[in-house]
Image: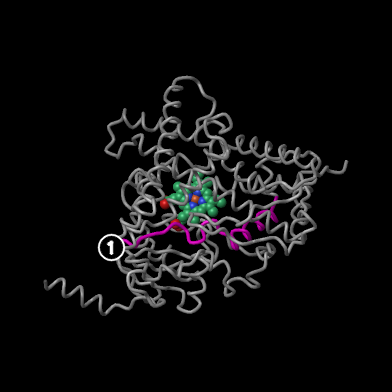
Amino acid sequence: LKNMKKSQKQKQQQQLPPGPPKLPILGNLLQLGELPHQSLWKLSKKYGPVMHLKLGRIPYVVVSSAETAREVLKVHDLECCGKARLTGVGKLSYNYLDVAFAPYGDHWRQMRKLCVMELFSHKRVQSFQFIREEEVASLVNSISRASSSASPVDLSQKIFALSGSILFRVAFGKRFQGSHFDNHKFHELLAAAMAVGGSFTSEECFPYVGWIIDRFSGYQAKIESVFQEVDSFLGQVIEDHLKAEGTKQEHEDIVDVMLRIKREQAQSAHEEEQLTTDHIKAVLVDLLLAGVDTSAVTVIWAMSELARNPRVMSKAQDEVRKCIGKNGSITEDNMEQLQYLKMIIKETFRLHPPGPMLLPRQTISHCKINGYDVNPETLLQVNVWAIGRDSRYWSKAEEFFPERFIDNSVDFKGQNFELLPFGGGRRICPGIQMGISTVELALANLLYHFNWKLPNGMEGGDLNMEEAIGQSLTTSKKTPLMLLPINYSHPK
Ligand code: HEM
């Protein structure tokens, strides 16, 4: 009793971060609106760069400046790198056997090591270069065929298909054309999984009664049905790989690598946690959730910004066409020369980070951010979208101006807290090289092989740049990007 009284007293003396007034039961849920990163940005202008809110019963802290992001991701990374246990995510991650949603601890460390050393190592990412090059070439061919009809192409759809095909081959070693997943079905399932991964159940937000809302809204049933479909697909993939074991294969895919490690572990008497089929499936779900949409939306936002900014588009085309010459075949080895293209990608990440508030974290223990108390088990997010648009760090912040990165060492590898598309600290994205390789190669090819026009006499300013509404882990463009491709042939 004495201890309880002491901790109550301590809590009363605490200074929580400021934040908007909270409604009984709902807390601040209604203030999040349809695009929470935008609503929270507006609120932060009033309440400051560290805000305290409540999502139903869940305490929620949002930071929105480079300085406070540094405190969360660097100074207090250890206190802030936990993960909340949310129903949808728990189900999809086979009860947190994965990396991205696993709580901080030995299990996460071991899975993270598997990712960094084996699955996304520099060597492994390079070993998939031929897949990226083949899939990008096939995208170029399909756009080239479409260009003869002189009608606009749905570039959003084509780029999602590209990113999905690459990840499918990298992870599972086969194309989804011809598998029981066609492009459409694959993306439908992925969107459903992203929605489940990106949302809370009412049960989490409301004490005692939440499960009733979930039952009536069908949310639990949705989680269950998405999980069943993903699980049966991954089960089939693993079975196919086991059947093919022993037959000589030229390239190891991600499933091969994990099955090999599982066999090696079974033979050695290591104390470490052993990989099981569920661990493998959980990591594969992470790859699907983290690796497809993120790269695709980056390319789509970049092409949208270029379509709106003809000056930047033609400067980028000049660069890539000069560098490649009439040879016409672009490989990843050319990328180092494409400095302007790299600036375009940074500028795209600044204005359109695919995960506008990173993945939600949960504090493990008490820490102070900007002098305010943040208690253990507080849901914590970094609004990197808001930081990218903050005029304190970026002059003419709303303008797409890649030249701002000339003679500017700011990069996106987690060391510069004003540009954090991949997050930072212990939980920084381990797939940076994998994602960037796809984004660079796709953009370079789209710019080399085609000139692009907006359809129906549209001007740059008419392009709809709104963000899609809906709970998901990534933020995509609301309307598909429709552009008219014109085949470019290099002068002899
Ligand atoms: C443009 C592409 C990508 C972007 C912008 C991106 C962004 C992110 C972000 C913001 C996080 C959370 C970091 C944090 O909370 O601090 C993350 C985590 C993660 N990403 Fe990526 N990502 C991309 C591509 C990929 C790819 C291609 C893969 C793998 C195939 C991948 C795998 C992961 C994993 C496994 C995590 C969880 C790491 C952990 O919790 O330890 N990502 N990513």
Above or below, comparing residue 59 to residue 238 in the picture:
below
Q: Position of residue 221 (x, y in %)?
A: 37, 46
Q: Residue at x 68, y 39 (%)?
A: 139
Give SS at disc 1: loop
Which residue, given by chain and number where applicable, does mark 1 sit on? 207
Q: Residue at x 67, y 66 (%)?
A: 404
Above or below, comparing residue 252 to residue 305 in the picture:
above
For residue 26, side relative to residue 332 (left or right): left
Quarter of the N terminus within the rendering: bottom left
For residue 333, side relative to residue 26 (left or right): right
Q: Quadrant of residue 341?
A: bottom right
Quarter of the C terminus within the rendering: top right
Above or below, comparing residue 81 to residue 330 in the picture:
below
Cβ at disc 1 under 8 Å from ligand 1: no
Magenta stretch: give its range.
Answer: 338-364
Above or below, comparing residue 345 to residue 115 in the picture:
below
The outermost residue toward the top is 247
135 is within the stretch colored magenta: no
Instruction: Pick whichever, 180 or 309, lies toward us.
Output: 180
Q: How busy is the neighbourhood of tag 1: few (under 14 within 10 Å), some, or many (20 plus)? A: few
Which amino acid, by three-letter code, is at mark 1?
Pro
Instruction: Pick whichever, 370 or 356, lies toward us.
Output: 356
For residue 1, side relative to residue 430 (left or right): left
